[in-house]
Amino acid sequence: MKIHFDDTNLRAAMIGDVHGLKSAEIKAGQPEALKALAGFQALVEEGRYGFPHQPFQTATIQEIERFGAQVRGSFDTVCLAGIGGSALGAWALDCGLRGPHPVQGAFTPTHPRLVILDNVDPALTLAALESMNPKKTLVVVIAKSGATAETVGAFLIVRDWLGPQGAKRIVAVTSEGRGDLKVLATREGYPTFHVPENVGGRFSVLSPVGLVPAALIGVNIRKLCKGAAGMTRLAWLPDLARNPALRSALMLYLSWTRKNKPIQVAFPYSNRLWGTAFWFRQLWAESLGKAKTRQGETVHAGQTPVAALGTTDQHSQVQLYMEGPNDKVHTFWTVARPASPGRIPRQKLGLEGFDYLAGQSLAKLLDVEQRSTAAALAANHRPNCAFTLDRLDEEHLGAFLQLLEFQTAFLGEMLDINAFDQEGVELGKKFTFGLMGRKGFESYREEYQRYETKRAQVRG
Ligand code: PA5
């Protein structure tokens, strides 16, 4: 497994002192990085955070593999009801390892597709139901809390659609000791896998949350975890030259805080990594967007993650990135050895605008376009860096996801914030519960109504 982090274009020598980091600044930041590593390590050793342990949970991995082998062939579609951290990891794995939607090829019992219901837009749910056969669908309902309104709403519809024998076609992933999903799973006898309490949603891709759907669609989860285990070993090294998670965390932290870059563009040059970009958006936004430090000081920290796809977004976003406000750090994600080159036919057509490409490959064009964009950004003093995965297979994707999780955790330490909670989403959820009539949330319904009254007065 080889993942390389190149930070050359974050440095002052490439993009100038105003936007680039001087060697002295990088050197001065190194103790902060080592402190962050030691701080996070202590929290993991205390048992507070469990994602670093996930790739080493051999018994769980085997149990999921056994279950996958038992049910294989009995479905051609896996329908996942989940949202946020309970859906995005599965999407990243599906897209990364089986190819981008909608060009994954025909689905069969040996090559099932993954349908993810991660929204309550009836247009999605109803179209999904029409596209699936209840006799050939395995439903995976995932909610760590066991009570997320969106997941419960979509699941109740799918459960009903499965019919009276439906319980046999449902698998649950939830917390062991709490939540109504656990109660229902026990009552109706669904096979159930548990999310460790110390693994938060957006850090759960290598727990049963990501591994169960992945195994069901045929991903080799053992190799996925092997790659992630290898990255975990690197991520604990107190050596910035050998630890890409710590090195990238430091460089991104310094660019963000010392060079004032409140936006990060995650810029995969790979359609297969597009799902990972959306997974990363949640990881970065929900983990690092925080009002207060752990000491209670108000900081409103956060770096807005933007997902852009190369080369597609060169024709959409790059004008802004080159000439708009210099407030972004661009992080390219590339694959050194793509599965196939995409040869362009040798035949020449006697047309200058076509013939220079004859006999070359799409992989070369993609690579050249990425390097050209990086060079042009540097010429415009725009900070950019790159992660290069040697290949895009289970081991590399597992390692990359783990790297990004460690990087986020280290950033949380450097910023002295709690990267593992999400208080900011609670109030909106409570209003929803109140308005939808959930018991115990009546006061939020009233508070919401006061807000509506105020709006009416302001509108006049
Ligand atoms: O990262 C998180 O903790 C959240 O984004 C959750 O994953 C999301 O809210 C879904 O929660 P649950 O799994 O309880 O349905």
Image (cartoon, rainbow, N blue to C red):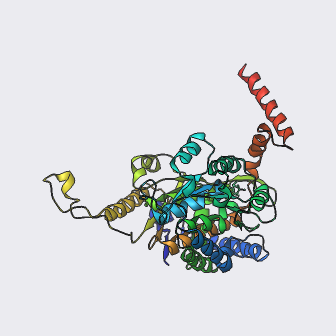
Does residue 191 sit above or below 41 in this rendering?
above
Picture coordinates of residue 260 (x, y %)? 59, 54
Residue 12 in view, yes or no: no
Q: Dividing the image into four equal quarters, which quarter contains ligand 1?
A: bottom right
Q: Is residue 268 left or right of residue 166?
A: left
**97 left or right of 48?**
left
Give the image location of residue 344, x and y in percent: 25, 61
Foreground residue, 396 or 15? 396
Q: Closer to the camera, 332 or 171?
A: 171
Rendering coords of residue 18 (x, y %): 53, 57
Vertical side of 439 occupied by 268: above or below: below
Quarter holding the C terminus is top right
In the figure, 263 relative to 93: above or below?
above
Which residue does the image show at 62% across and 67% down from the upper left?
212
Query: Farthest front residue?
Result: 164
Residue 433 or 297: which is nearer the viewer?
Answer: 433
Residue 2 horizontal side relative to residue 158, left or right: left
In which image quadrant can residue 214 be found? Answer: bottom right
